[in-house]
Image: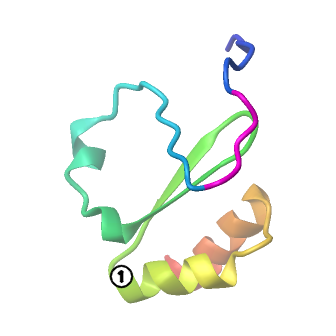
Amino acid sequence: MTSVPSPLRPLNGNEMICIPAEIPRELREIDDELKAIYHSNNSVCIWVFNSTEDRNSFVSRSIGMNKHERSALYDESFR
């Protein structure tokens, strides 16, 4: 994977960033309310839930966690 310098200016909030990508049909067909999306410097993670309540619980409980901690929480609580 090649790292490309970002053309973005510093962000102040209330902004949207779109990264062009080819998203698989199976993922596009899942209701957005059932997905939690996080990123790190080298990956994008999408967790899929059975209910909006589960998704909201995961989002609330995972505040401040890194990718490894979020993955562990998902595995322990939602699989």
**Picture coordinates of residue 35 (x, y %)?**
41, 64
| Residue at the image point whose x is 39% and y is 73% from the top | 49
53 relative position to 43: left or right = left
Q: Secondary structure at mark 1?
A: helix
Q: Nearer the viewer, residue 5 or 63?
A: 5
Can you say which quadrant of the picture contains the N terminus? Answer: top right
| Residue at the image point whose x is 55% and y is 48% from the top | 15
Q: Nearer the viewer, residue 66 or 74?
A: 66
The residue segment tinted magenta is 9-13
**Picture coordinates of residue 26 (x, y %)?**
24, 45
Question: Picture quarter containing residue 38?
Answer: bottom right
Query: From the viewer's perspective, is residue 11 above or below residue 78?
Result: above
Residue placed under numbered mark 1 in the picture: 52
Kind of residue at disc 1? Thr
How many residues crowd around disc 1 within 10 Å: few (fewer than 14), some, or many (20 or more)?
Answer: some
Query: From the viewer's perspective, is residue 36 above or below residue 61?
Result: above
**Picture coordinates of residue 51 (x, y %)?**
33, 82
